[in-house]
Image (cartoon, helix red, strand yellow):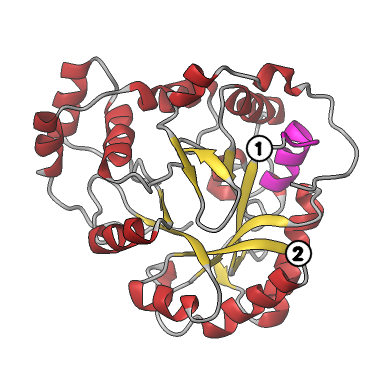
């Protein structure tokens, strides 16, 4: 990755973990048609912003500490967006980690904006998408963005509908100009993925999916056949954390937390699933990363698969 700009006072010597340590982060995955290989447990930066994903965090030093420990622990996949804050999370990432480790893959997304009333609004015109790329580049301190997801915004910010051709064509043009290296989709349907693939190679899909929200089962199975990454956002339920007596019972039996079991289930679900659990807490970060060491037997997996579906409506 060609990453420039002044260096932050952060030594990446601490980030050099041995292969055995990194293997515990769920194994590794290479995005299709790229040289980008990541550990399957990454980090989602949304919670680094203030309450409601707005403004700065109460403790910026703690946010920086979380990012640095994540990277030192082997995390090399960070998910972010410049509309988180807005601008806040990207600026914290830059302050904490720049100059970036060579193997760090930063994935961002476009398609939304946060006006002064703190609402979540669509921003998917060609001009807005181009401006969004430049905002991400500036605030992250990058020459080019590794992967950009076009986030399809639906009514009420639920699942998006309609054509994505115009937006993907804009990203494809930005890729030709060298500002974007690879393209993904977020909050997209199988139909939208197929349409996007007629315009550009798609390396990942990022949708709402977790132990209790499994609308994308068929899509995940199709993506694994194409070796395309599937990145579930809100793997732990987001603003409404997962709650299940079965999950709690299994966790107690395994000596783990329910959230660790939920993350481990996702890793077992399909080899193309990449996790980006977010937190602003060092303790929770360590718990999330430890999920990569949790083995689930076929009996436990069958029990977890029986958890009933609970519909969710989330922003991301």
Give the residue at mark 2. 179
Residue at left 43%, top 58%?
228
Q: Is 277 in front, or is 17?
A: 17
Instruction: Provide residue 43's location: percent of width, then percent of height.
Output: 53, 38
On the rendered structure, is 196 left or right of 241?
right
Secondary structure of the residue carrying tag 2 is loop
Residue 148 sits in which quadrant?
bottom right
Under tag 1, what secondary structure? loop
Percent x, y for residue 72?
62, 22
1 left or right of 288?
right
The tag earlier along the polypeptide, 1 or 2, is: 1
Q: In the image, is residue 29 above or below residue 109?
A: above
Task: Identify residue for label 1.
Answer: 103
Q: Nearer the viewer, mark 1 or mark 2?
A: 1
Magenta extent: 89-101
Residue, x 49% and y 18% (percent of image)? 21
x and y percentages locating residue 316 in the rendered image: 48, 56
Q: Is residue 126 left or right of residue 29?
A: right
Residue at 74% x, 33% y: name it: 97
Q: Position of residue 289 (x, y in %)?
A: 45, 26
Q: Residues within 10 Å of mark 1 (few under 14, many from 20)?
A: some
Q: How far apart are labels 1 and 2 at the CA level?
A: 19 Å
Image height of 15 relative to 145, above or below: above
Is 247 magenta? The answer is no
Left of 44 or right of it: where is 233?
left
Residue 43 visible in the displayed image: no
């Amino acid at each position: 990755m060609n990453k420039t700009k002044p260096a932050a006072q952060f030594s990446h010597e601490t980030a050099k973990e041995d292969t055995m340590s990194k293997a515990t982060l769920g194994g590794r995955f290479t995005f299709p048609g790229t040289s980008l290989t990541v550990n399957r447990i990454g980090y989602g930066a949304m919670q680094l912003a203030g309450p409601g994903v707005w403004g700065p965090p109460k403790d910026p030093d703690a946010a920086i500490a979380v990012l640095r420990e994540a990277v030192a622990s082997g995390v090399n996949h960070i998910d972010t967006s410049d509309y988180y804050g807005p601008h806040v999370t990207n600026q914290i990432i830059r302050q904490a980690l720049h100059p970036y480790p060579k193997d760090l893959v930063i994935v961002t997304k476009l398609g939304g904006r946060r006006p002064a009333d703190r609402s979540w609004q669509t921003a998917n015109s060609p001009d807005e998408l181009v401006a969004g790329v430049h905002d991400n580049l500036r605030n992250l301190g990058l020459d080019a963005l590794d992967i950009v997801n076009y986030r399809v915004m639906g009514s009420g910010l639920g699942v998006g509908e309609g054509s994505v051709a115009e937006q993907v064509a804009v990203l494809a043009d930005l890729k030709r100009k060298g500002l974007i290296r690879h393209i993904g989709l977020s909050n997209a349907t199988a139909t939208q993925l197929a349409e996007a693939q007629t315009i550009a190679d798609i390396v990942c899909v990022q949708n709402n999916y977790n132990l209790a929200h499994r609308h994308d089962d068929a899509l995940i199975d199709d993506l694994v056949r194409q070796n395309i990454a599937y990145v579930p956002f809100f793997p732990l339920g987001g603003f409404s954390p997962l709650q299940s007596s079965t999950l709690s019972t299994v966790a107690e039996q395994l000596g783990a937390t329910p959230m660790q079991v939920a993350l481990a289930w996702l890793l077992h679900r399909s080899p193309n699933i990449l996790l980006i659990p977010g937190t602003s807490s060092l303790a929770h970060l360590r718990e999330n990363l430890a999920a990569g060491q949790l083995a689930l037997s076929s009996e436990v997996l069958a029990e977890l698969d029986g958890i009933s579906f609970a519909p969710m409506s989330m922003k991301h």
